[in-house]
Image (cartoon, coloured by chain):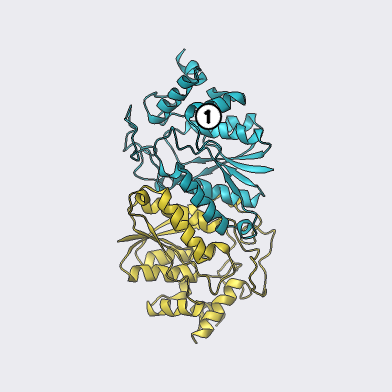
Chain colours: A cyan, B yellow
């Protein structure tokens, strides 16, 4: 069995990679360079693909596609210690997961993969619409109609093993699979050496997760001790 | 009103561009370079965007995303004079329209466009699954759930004015709008100077369309008279 794994290099997608391998899939990792502020995550993705002996592709996306987001460029700042409510934050990137999944779909059909793994997660998350289960379901329906394999009744299946997990449950799964989380990067606004800001949504959700499983984040140990 | 127009440089998308302008839209044209055999179409797209005073963006897509298609690389030949039945031909490109529409969606939301125009057409076509109305409907539903504007009840609308048109009806619409079809390119396997092969599905559907409206194709006049 072969699968495309969308691998940003963050905590969720790294866990998904280990999960897919644990389930017996041969993995092709797919990452995207859209000149994101947190481009350091691509180094993590490269290292994770390497140590899991996965094939790895990094696709460049013109960052001009994504305006009006705090994650590209420097015009909009990444919010610090904001209250996470139901609203969509400025770190939202227009149609990002749709572009990522579309590439994964092309790659999966081109290389006879049965599945696409994505670390979308709708519990401890920032409120992005394209992380919700109803979005994934709609993407699957669209994909079934889009591709040859779908028409032939043998579609590529989008797997979201973490979608109903809390951050703590995700970390537990990763630790069970011996994933070294010091190789991942979650921060939206890290220093050039990868040191996390500890104030963005992503850093705080990560910290909350490690607190809940009573574990020390190895990334924090690496940078702050 | 602003719209993103998916402009390959072919007959259908050129007609859609003129149609969108006629409907009063300010147009941002979006084309893709995936090292397609018929890359000459990008020169047509550039010229069409220029003469209609549209903004134009050409996005590069790694052709490695698309294997097993006759339209990329030289391993698989473009069929000549094949019988067009209900099967999906080797010129099918995995998830192509899904990637194209996803980029259009990101661009539309980033630049406050109300609509995306695509020249998908399910009558005189090669049998691609991602040209069917049910596919477009499913993409719209997915898009409504994917993007911030969708969640806010003000989604980007995918417009397919040609979807139920025959090739002849498309050409009639273009001629009404004074579109010079010598500036378009349809052939899947043209010579380097743009001269069409006249044997691929696309050339033959085009020829049939012009025959049905009793018009001479200006592209044929340009190259063969």
What is the x, y in percent for residue A166?
Answer: 48, 30
Q: Is residue B53 left or right of residue B78?
A: left
What is the x, y in percent for residue A224?
Answer: 45, 15
Q: Quadrant of the N terminus of chain B?
A: bottom left
Residue A1 visible in the current orientation: yes
Residue B33 visible in the current orientation: no
Of all residues shown, which one is farthest toward the bottom? B214
What is the x, y in percent for residue A60?
Answer: 50, 44
Q: Vertical placement of B16 versus A127: above or below?
A: below
Q: Secondary structure at mark 1?
A: helix
Q: Could you tell me which chain the residue with mark 1 belongs to?
A: A
What is the x, y in percent for residue B201?
Answer: 61, 72
Q: In the image shown, does B195 or B198 lie closer to the viewer?
A: B198
Q: Residue at x 63, y 70 (%)?
A: B86
Task: Find residue B92 and report its image quarter.
Answer: bottom right
Q: Residue at x 65, y 68 (%)?
A: B87
Q: In the image shown, does B193 or A31 lie closer to the viewer?
A: A31
Of all residues shown, which one is farthest toward the top? A225
Task: Find residue A6 and report its image quarter.
Answer: top right
Task: State the residue position of label 1.
Answer: A170
Q: Is residue B187 left or right of residue B161?
A: right
Numbered circles on residues, count: 1
Q: Vertical placement of A46 versus B59: above or below?
A: above
Q: Vertical placement of A159 versus B160: above or below?
A: above
Disc 1 crowd, CA 10 A, few/some/many (<14, 14-19, 20+)? many
Task: Find residue B159 and report its image quarter.
Answer: bottom left
Q: In the image shown, does A53 or B30 lie closer to the viewer?
A: A53
């Amino acid at each position: 069995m072969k699968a495309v794994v969308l691998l940003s290099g963050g905590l969720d997608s790294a866990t998904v990679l280990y999960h897919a391998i644990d389930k017996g899939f041969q993995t092709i990792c797919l990452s995207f360079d859209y000149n994101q502020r947190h481009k350091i995550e691509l180094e993590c993705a490269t290292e994770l693909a390497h140590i899991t002996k996965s094939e790895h592709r990094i696709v460049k996306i013109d960052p001009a596609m994504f305006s009006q987001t705090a994650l590209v460029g420097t015009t909009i700042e990444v919010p610090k210690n904001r209250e996470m409510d139901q609203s969509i934050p400025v770190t939202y990137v227009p149609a990002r997961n749709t572009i990522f999944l579309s590439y994964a779909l092309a790659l999966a059909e081109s290389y006879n993969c049965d599945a696409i793994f994505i670390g979308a997660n709708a519990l401890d998350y920032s409120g992005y619409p394209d992380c919700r289960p109803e979005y994934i379901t709609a993407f699957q329906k669209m994909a079934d109609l889009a591709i040859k394999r779908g028409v032939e009744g043998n579609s590529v299946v989008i797997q979201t093993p973490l979608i109903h997990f809390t951050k703590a449950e995700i970390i537990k799964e990763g630790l069970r699979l011996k994933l070294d989380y010091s190789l991942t990067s979650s921060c939206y606004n890290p220093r050039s050496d990868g040191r996390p800001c500890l104030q963005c949504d992503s850093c705080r959700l990560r910290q909350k997760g490690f607190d809940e499983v009573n574990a020390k984040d190895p990334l924090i140990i690496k940078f702050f001790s």
